[in-house]
Image (spheres, helix red, strand yellow):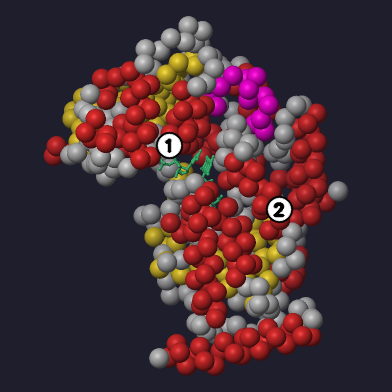
Amino acid sequence: MFTNVIRRCFVPCLIRRSLSIVSNNSTVSSSPIRICVIGSGPAGFYLTQNLLKLSQTIPTTIDIIEKAPVPFGLVRYGVAPDHPEVKNVINTFTKIAEHERVRFIGNIHIGKTIGLKELQEFYHIIVLAYGSSVERNLHIPGETTLENVFSAKDFVGWYNGVPDNAQLRPQLNHTDQAIIIGMGNVALDCARMLLSSIDDLAKTDITDIALDTLRQSRIRHVILVARRGPMQVSFTIKELRELTKLNGVQSMLNKEDFNQIDQIMIDKLERPRKRLTELMLKTARTKQSQNNAERFWYLKFWRRPKQLNGKTLVESVDFEHTESVANGDFSDPNLSVQPNGTIETIPCGLVIKSIGYYGVQIDPWLPFDTERGIIRNRQYRIDDRPGFYCTGWIGRGARGVIAETTTESHTVAKRIMEDVEQGHLTNLHDVKSGGDGLIALAKSRQIRCISYEDWKKLDAHETNLGHTKGKPREKILNIQKMLELTAS
Ligand code: FAD
Ligand code: NAP
């Protein structure tokens, strides 16, 4: 009832405002709805694209605010260098960033250099799309004290040129065995980087530093370890297939690990899980005959890490063997496990913990679920904070591929524009200055904002540098240098 009253008064008013703006042809002097999206990963860009589509008749501007001096989030800093086709989404993102109603504002760290609540002075609507930037931990002895133990987040950041990870310096030349804990797609990415031929990697946008270190690598055996069974792995078929097809690399799956899985069980699975399980089975059953194999990868199931051992560098990991709780169904994705008392020590000289990411609360005022690492929200509306929304990993947790972000962004944009049109947002009559106000505030704090045009200068520099080396790009690893290049 109340909603309907507001709707009756507000929508015509909004449309009148929009008409007057259109007829005066002066969107600058009137006050459009100012939206800001925090985070320039896939979630931020696809949401902006959908907001543009749905706000064609309502004067609206959208600013994408990014803490890094460069856009694209995990598309630049997560997606593996040997997956260039995935990075093609950057072409779409560029069109979005260059739209007349969109402005990219980089090098603004919300919650650090500019407060979240300060944004309310400049924007009517604030969408949080800042992803999940922190790694999960095992909380076991040796994890933080021993050398050559890395989170996948840092290892990925190292080979992908994240400035904070430039000094990681993994030692790959003193050991021939690496353990990766976890069996998700990030674990497979890390395994592929350790096992791929240098000639193949040299043609990608992997950093020169990582390439040189991998060139010296003596690692021949990569063991991926999961605490549950083969039917609970979280990697997907395309990524598994890539690993089975690497040149000079042999899959060492153990067919006994699949004894408990029969055809009846497989036939009941949903198609993606069915095909994945069949590929694992086929790989395990096919006698490997890569005579020229120089490197090997293994899947070890039902093992939970208990302790990392070593003096300075990691030398081995103790695993507790696990089994399903109360005769659980082996195909149950939620299967629970418990330790059975057996301890196994697996030697290694490198450990990568690939057990997932989670999000952080960038402002104490933001309702946050610390357990799950997500902003508390009801269907993308942030609890008790009208005008605030979330999308992408920070709203749903660190899972899902870029395509899922695309699908979700339709719904989020629709929800926001419904709230606009149905009068749920009471501040829309206020005049807000949007990016102009934000940039002025940043300037007063000696923060240099990076525009999309600025980024394109750095982009050109990186691609030119890469081309001289036969690579698509050589990323700049130093923030100061990045800022200089965007200014030149
Ligand atoms: P992000 O991509 O993380 O974007 C969040 C953005 O917010 C970042 O740019 C960040 O710098 C910015 N930000 C964070 N905090 C702040 C702040 N306080 N102020 C301002 N800005 C901030 N999916 C695929 O489909 N194919 C793949 O090959 C693939 N490979 C992947 C590899 C790895 C290692 C990982 C971790 C994921 C991969 N994914 C892949 C999944 C894909 O990257 C995610 O689905 C997607 O990036 C999530 O989008 P997002 O926008 O929510 O988060
Ligand atoms: P993930 O898919 O959630 O995998 C995490 C792995 O860590 C699981 O095997 C999990 O096992 C294990 N794990 C979690 N906590 C553990 C603990 N305490 N001890 C031992 N093992 C633990 O996460 P991710 O690999 O980081 O990937 C994140 C998302 O990005 C996924 O949706 C992924 O598909 C996507 N991604 C996609 C691509 C691609 O498309 N090419 C590439 C990279 C990433 P349990 O199941 O037992 O918890």
Q: Dot 1 lies on which element?
A: loop
Residue 379 on the magenta span: no
Using the image as rendered, state which of residue 362 and residue 90 is in the foreground. 90
Residue 203 on the magenta span: yes
Q: Which residues are magenta?
A: 193-207
Identify the residue shown where x is 50% and y is 22%: 245
Visible residue check, residue 342: yes
Amino acid type of the residue that numbered disc 2 sits on in the rendered structure: Thr
Visible residue check, residue 76: no
Residue 367 picture quarter: bottom left
Whole-percent x, y for residue 442 in the image: 72, 65
Whole-percent x, y for residue 86 in the image: 59, 41
Whole-percent x, y for residue 351 in the image: 44, 27
Q: Quadrant of the N terminus?
A: bottom left
Identify the residue shown where x is 30% and y is 35%: 231
Q: Dot 2 lies on which element?
A: helix
Amino acid type of the residue that numbered disc 1 sits on in the rendered structure: Thr
Q: Quadrant of ligand 2?
A: top left
Identify the residue shown where x is 77% and y is 26%: 469
Q: Residues within 10 Å of mark 1 (few under 14, many from 20)?
A: some
Residues at marks 1 and 2, CA–CA distance in whole angstroms: 29 Å
Q: Residue furthest right?
A: 488
Identify the residue shown where x is 61% and y is 63%: 48
Residue annotated with mark 1: 236
Query: In the visual, does 235 lie left or right of 126?
Result: left
Is 135 above or below relative to 1?
A: above
- Queried on whether the Cβ of the residue with tag 1 lies below 8 angstroms from ligand 2, the answer reads yes
First in sequence, mark 1 or 2: give its number: 2
Q: Residues within 10 Å of mark 2 (few under 14, many from 20)?
A: some
Residue annotated with mark 2: 94
Using the image as rendered, state which of residue 237 and residue 222 is in the foreground. 237
Q: Residue furthest left?
A: 326
